[in-house]
Image (cartoon, rainbow, N blue to C red):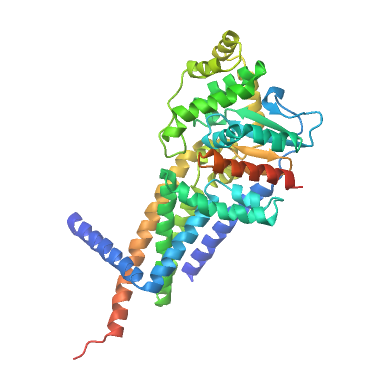
Amino acid sequence: MGIRKVAETVFDRIKLGLQGVCSVFSRPKYAIFGIFCVIFIAYILNFWRDGNGNWQLLCSGLPLGDKLGVLGRVFTSMVEFFRSFSGFTVALLALLQGIVVTQLIFTWRHREKNAALDGASTGGIGAILGFIALGCPSCGIGLLTPILSAIAGASAVAMAETIGHIFTILAFALLVFTIIRLGYIDFILANVSKGKEKPCKK
Amino acid sequence: MQKVIRVVALVGVIGLLVGLVIYNTLNPAPPDMGVWNEAMSKGDAATAKHHFVMYTDIFCPYCDKFSNAVAANLDKWEKDYIERENILFEIRVTDVNYENGHSKNSRPAGIAAYCAAKQNNFWDYYYALLEQMFDDYFSNGIGIDPYSEKIPDLPNSYFTDVAKSVKLDQKSFKQCVENQETAKELDKNTALAQNRINGGVPRFVFDKFTYDGFAGIWDTTSDYEQVKTLMNAGLSTK
């Protein structure tokens, strides 16, 4: 098979994958679930974006009202934060992860459990990498730094920025790969279910 | 079956990472009541009921967000916390970002901070330097996070020029910065701090409450609310 043929096949797969994503999100219940997922994941990522600070506040001796205030402030700061480039990165990660979760649910519910598990593991690795690369690892703020210092000591933190960037790129690549791959399966599933709903009349 | 194992392994890895973070959170900081440099503290060391420590690097934007918010509300902050709650608030300046290869500016800034402390005027110099950095860089989106444009390597004159607006013996301050007279103290304190921080700054050790990072948005009103939350968490954690 020539390079051109391979490129055409890959391009077709991507095209069908994106059509699959559209067919999942054109169904109102999946679209609503997807939006909920994106907001929920964005909240979680924003909660952890600067390390475990918010978690430490929840574990502190602050009264309950103040702890609820901490949870509420994560939500309001989310909007402000998304105006910066790193905020945009977090928003994009949340969007991709939300799409993957919705696709996984769709695929699972259409009895393609093997494909869903495949997607869950690839997408899951992407999600973890994106999650731990958040914040500013080089200045010690983020989940990567405590992990690195726990595994390899404080000196390993010098490499945190590079590792953080690699993790972010890998996270995006894995999530996009998972979306296209699951999208292709979803495209087939959506068309099969269309066929079942409206059988051809002879 | 193999795929189920993969998913279970994945969940295990997530659990491990979360466990590690929680372990780091709950791991108590070593008890440490001594003041490293008296000129870098606020409050009465002899009578203070609380000892709040902030490990910082002047070229750490997250640390500067905290200090900028305090500087903008200084009178209120001093009255509500330092005086009313009888807190000894100490800043421990390090150059961890220089040691980590993140910013060359951390070192001259740290040296200059200790030079100002040598003349017993650390706080005025510190706030003047942060204000200058905010005007020159942070307000323009430079050096605010790992994705933004980096602050260029600054000459010593950047740190000595800031001192002109502060009551300091300009000649000896300039000499101190250029001859790196406080480098040993900075190195010693950075080495001590490395054992007390999770690899980075800011780290707040407010009595028994520890906190890493500061999620401000460069808005001194909103960021001061977070400062208050941290201070209150320090006061209420037993």
Q: Position of residue A191 (x, y in %)?
A: 28, 76
Query: Which quadrant does the N terminus of chain A fall into?
Result: bottom left
Q: Position of residue B50 (x, y in %)?
A: 76, 37
Q: Is residue B201 visible?
A: no
Q: Position of residue A102 (x, y in %)?
A: 42, 67
- How many marks the image carries: the answer is 0
Q: Residue at x 60, y 28 (%)?
A: B94
Instruction: Kindly give the residue lying farthest to the top in the view shown.
Output: B171
Instruction: Kindly give the residue lying farthest to the right in the view shown.
Output: B47
Give the side of residue A149 with respect to residue B90, left or right.
left
- Viewer-closest of B236 and A179: B236
Q: Is residue A23 above or below residue B198?
A: below
Q: Residue at x 34, y 64 (%)?
A: A181
Q: Residue at x 49, y 51 (%)?
A: A78
- Viewer-closest of B90 and A77: A77
Q: Is residue B204 above or below residue A22?
A: above
Q: Is residue A31 visible?
A: yes
Q: Position of residue B217 (x, y in %)?
A: 50, 42
Query: Which quadrant does the C terminus of chain A fall into?
Result: bottom left
